[in-house]
Amino acid sequence: MECSTVPEALAGIQDGATLMVGGFGLVGIPENLILGLRDLGTRGLTVISNNCGVDDWGLGLLLKNRQIRKMVSSYVGENKEFERQFLSGELEVELVPQGTLAERCRAGGAGIPAFYTPAGVGTPIAEGRETRLFNGREYLLETALTADFALVKAWRGDRLGNLQYRRTARNFNPMMAAAGRITIAEVEEVVEIGGMDPDQVHTPSIYVQRLLCCSQQEKRIERRTVRQGAQA
């Protein structure tokens, strides 16, 4: 369903919902959908995302507004409020190795309930959890992740909901799009059916329930680094 407004796209997200949110740092985040959630004030959210934005942008806005109850992520990053809430016990955090997080989301979308991985074996992550030997090597059992809603960002979409991502902004978005029971895609451009090369479709429309075109994108840079000029 093609939506005309942010509130229409976010309809049905209630307090206590579990969300997957695409992006890596501030790259490929559904920034307009996040702003819409902030304005709705929905609370008690469990958010599955690689990180939690920065203090004043991305998911950091929801964190600052006390809308997130639990984060499942791999990186605290540049977000001081994330660190503060975690250390003070205000925020429940499940830290997951980055590759494991991606695979847990992918498995959820593929209908695979669990898998074994060597990542985390012998660390506090594995304490009290099931491990198993395969070919003489120890592996840790990890369960798949799914969510009530997946909020993803794509470069282009057609009116059926087929999505195309742009370069590194693809990151976590495809696997999360497949793992959400209701997937809401924010796109920069909508093309007519047949306007995308089928070979360039990264997420098929079968995974996408709602499509929202937001041509206005701020696309902040998390940390700008420039090269110093040569000394005379």
Image (cartoon, rainbow, N blue to C red):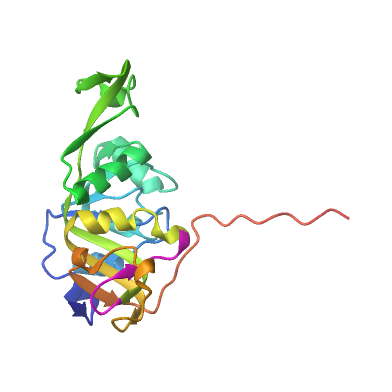
Choose between 217 and 162: the one closer to the eye.
Answer: 162
Residue drawn 40% across and 78% down?
A: 216
The reply, left or right, for residue 219 in relation to residue 23 is right
In the rendered view, would you say 179 is above or below 206?
Answer: above
By secondary structure, the bulk of the magenta-drawn segment is best described as loop
Q: Quadrant of the N terminus?
A: bottom left
Across and down, in percent, residue 146 comes to 18, 49
Q: Considering only vertical position in the picture, is 219 above or below 223?
A: below
Q: Count the marks.
A: 0
Instruction: Estimate the x, y position of residue 85 in percent, counting from the top left.
Output: 30, 43
- Residue 62 is a magenta residue: no
| Position in image of residue 25 (x %, y %) | 42, 53
Range of residues picked out in magenta: 158-167
Residue 67 can be seen in this image: no
Residue 127, x across and y down, in percent: 24, 21
The residue that appears at 19% across and 57% down in the rendered structure is 180
Residue sticking out furthest to the front: 199
Residue 202, visible in the rendered structure? yes
Q: Relative to 151, does residue 124 appear above or below in the rendering?
A: above
Asked which quadrant contains residue 137, the reply is top left
**Which residue sits at x=45%, y=47%?**
78
Quadrant of the rendered image containing residue 8 = bottom left
Residue at 26% x, 55% y is 176
Residue 163 within the segment the image draws in magenta: yes
Q: Quadrant of the C terminus?
A: bottom right
Front residue of 178/18: it is 178
Extreme residue in the top direction: 136
Closest to the observer, 228 or 67: 228
